[in-house]
Image (spheres, rainbow, N blue to C red):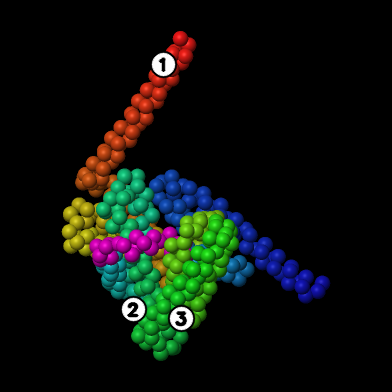
Amino acid sequence: MDISSIASYINKVELFKILLPLSLVFCLAKALGLVARKLQMPQVVGQILAGLILGPCVLNIIDISSPDYGLSIRTIAEIGVIMLMFSAGLGTNLKELLKVGHIAFLVAVSGVFVPLAGGVGVYYLFGFDNGSRFFEALVMGTILAATSVSITVQALKELGYLRSKVGNTILSAAIIDDVIGIIVLTFVISVSDSREKGSHDSIELVCLKVFLFFVLSFVLGFIFYRAFKWLENRRPHTRSIPIFAMGFCFFLAYIAEVYFGIAEITGAYAAGIIFCQLKSARYIEEKIDICLYMFFGPVFFASVGLKSNLKGMNLSILWFAAAITVVALITKVIGCGLMAKLCRFSKSDSLKVGVGMMTRGEVALIVTDKGITAGIIDKSINFAVVPLIIVSSLITPILLKVLYSIWPDNKVRRKKDRESEQKAITYTGMYEDKDNTQAEEISSSADNKE
């Protein structure tokens, strides 16, 4: 047996070892995802629970630290994070983001820094210390600052208020909210890494690196955007476009991490923003989402549960999880709702804006995962974040329904009534025209018979 045969055999053994864990992750994650959707919760909740069940918390079937397949699962999960942020960037409506008024911007800023301060305060109050308490507290605050409006969007759509003033404010503020959250995370990880490695990089130097990265992203973005516009005109809606776009995403993520000391997810998000105005942006996003939905997404979200371990669980962690959940919900309502009120929203609409911004989801998980991977926070923090996502996902649609039943948006209701009346008039006219046409045809045939 030669060397190439031995290498081939080893590779087959490694492939064989990861197949069973992946099979279990996919099947259970999808099954519990469907259960979560039936319960009006995001499927991501079911996928996280699948990881908790398969990991050390319950059955301990899959060990993500295993030397046989653990590195492979972690690598797939990391790629899933990058693709998830790239997809988020692609889904950004840059024109709406640029057009959005000062109200949405102020709501977003307040909705980031009030929960950030609340998260830092709770972390210091409970006294956790993983070696760099200040940065741990900042990461915890950033987790609370991140907003995921997918549940809110679905709830407003079902209620018929998605395109209302409140709905547009929530959507616009959520986009800015995520951008600010990613930038804050980038600063925290960059400064923490430089100090951990014994580097003498000051905060000013880190800020300079971040600034230079965004300048480089702007220059590369202009060049590649023009190149992709030419490509989509020559080969519209062909598979080569999303493949080249994915390649650029990985390239920019690599540049961000290696040369600027910035989290790779920042580079991936920037790549998505660069391409979001292409005609093929939706097509690229659809192809990326297929990969996420079928393969990388379930592994990443399940890995959140797989990384959790009950060995570190104690009463203080449980109290911490409860406190973080309460603080996260209240600070979003206060931060966003109070700023909306200062921007001359009514009391009821301000409360709706605050409640609509309460949900946490993918971005919170990504921030948590990056904080754990960077060694800033402990794995036990997962036990505080997962309940927050579940509770916020459950309570937000319920509260929005209650608020709109008490204070309905009369402008939207009148608009709906006018649209219904217009449709009724249009349909009536169509049927009248049809009846008149049939009468004319009958009359014409009778004349011909005569």
Q: Secondary structure at mark 1?
A: helix
Q: Residue at x 43, y 20 (%)?
A: 441
User: Which numbered mark, 1 or 3, is in the foreground of this view?
Assistant: 1
Task: Answer yes or no: is residue 372 visible.
Answer: no
> Closest to the observer: 203 or 219?
219
- Return the disc, 1 or 3, that comes first in the chain's sequence: 3
Q: Which mark is residue 443?
A: 1
Mark 3 = which residue? 260
- Please identify the dominant SS of the magenta region: helix
Mark 2 = which residue? 134
Q: Residue at x 35, y 85 (%)?
A: 204
Q: Position of residue 119 (x, y in %)?
A: 30, 69
Q: Secondary structure at mark 2?
A: helix
Task: Examine the structure image and report whether residue 152 is included in the region drawn in magenta.
Answer: no
Q: Distance from label 2 to label 3 (Cα)?
A: 23 Å
- Return the disc, 1 or 2, that comes first in the chain's sequence: 2
- Determine whether, in the image, residue 346 is placed left or right of residue 285: left
Question: Which segment did they paint magenta?
Answer: 86-107
Could you tell me the amino acid type at mark 1? Ser
Mark 3 residue crowding within 10 angstroms, few (<14) / some (14–19) / many (20+): some
